Amino acid sequence: MTGDTLNTAKNMLQKRLPDEQDAELLNSLLSEAALTLLSLTHREQLPAGMAGLLSRLSAVYYNRLGLEGENLRKEGSVQMAMDGVPDDILREIRAWRLAWVPKCVP
């Protein structure tokens, strides 16, 4: 990931989470989200255009802190399902995917 992409994503994340002052936590969330994006797109580096996606996915991870291992939460008549990456973000990630061709071993 280039430094510009990371700085842009970090600035966007700080605007999304203005009350969060823990820089180490924000960096950790950005790193985790970057690894997810790299894995899902079959890339080695994130292009600058993915900074927004990186920021949004980091915010999703932030909102899920404390819910590790939970897939479904029901409180009264309100039910929340947490299934990995949200569908709207996953659609955007798929647009950035590179073709993946397995190596042939002779």
Image (spheres, grey):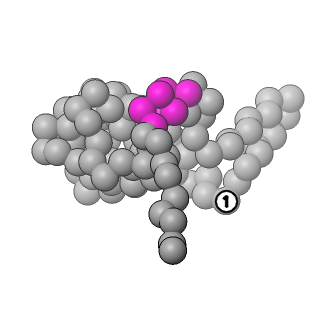
| Closest to the observer, 66 or 11 | 11
Residue 95: in magenta span: yes
Specify whether residue 83 is painted magenta.
Answer: no
- Binning the other alpha carbons within 10 Å of mark 1 as few (below 14), some (14 to 19) or many (20 upward) gives few
Residue at the extreme bottom of the image, as rendered: 106
Q: Position of residue 103 (x, y in %)?
A: 48, 63
Find the magenta span and give its range: 91-97
Q: Name the magenta segment's main secondary structure.
A: helix
Quickly name the residue at label 1: 69
**Mark 1, secondary structure of its residue:** loop
Residue 89 in view in this figure:
no
Which amino acid does the dot numbered 1 rest on? Gly
In the visual, does 66 lie left or right of 35?
right
Q: Is residue 32 left or right of residue 45?
A: right
Relative horizontal placement of residue 7, taking residue 92 as reference (left or right): left
Residue 21 x, y percent position in the rendering: 25, 44
Extreme front residue here?
A: 106
Image quarter of residue 47:
top left
- The one nearer the camera, 52 or 18, is 52
Residue drawn 68% across the image and 43% down it: 83
User: How many discs appear?
Assistant: 1
The residue depicted at 13 percent of the width and 37 percent of the height is 4
Q: Could you tell me residue 95's position as x and y percent?
A: 47, 28
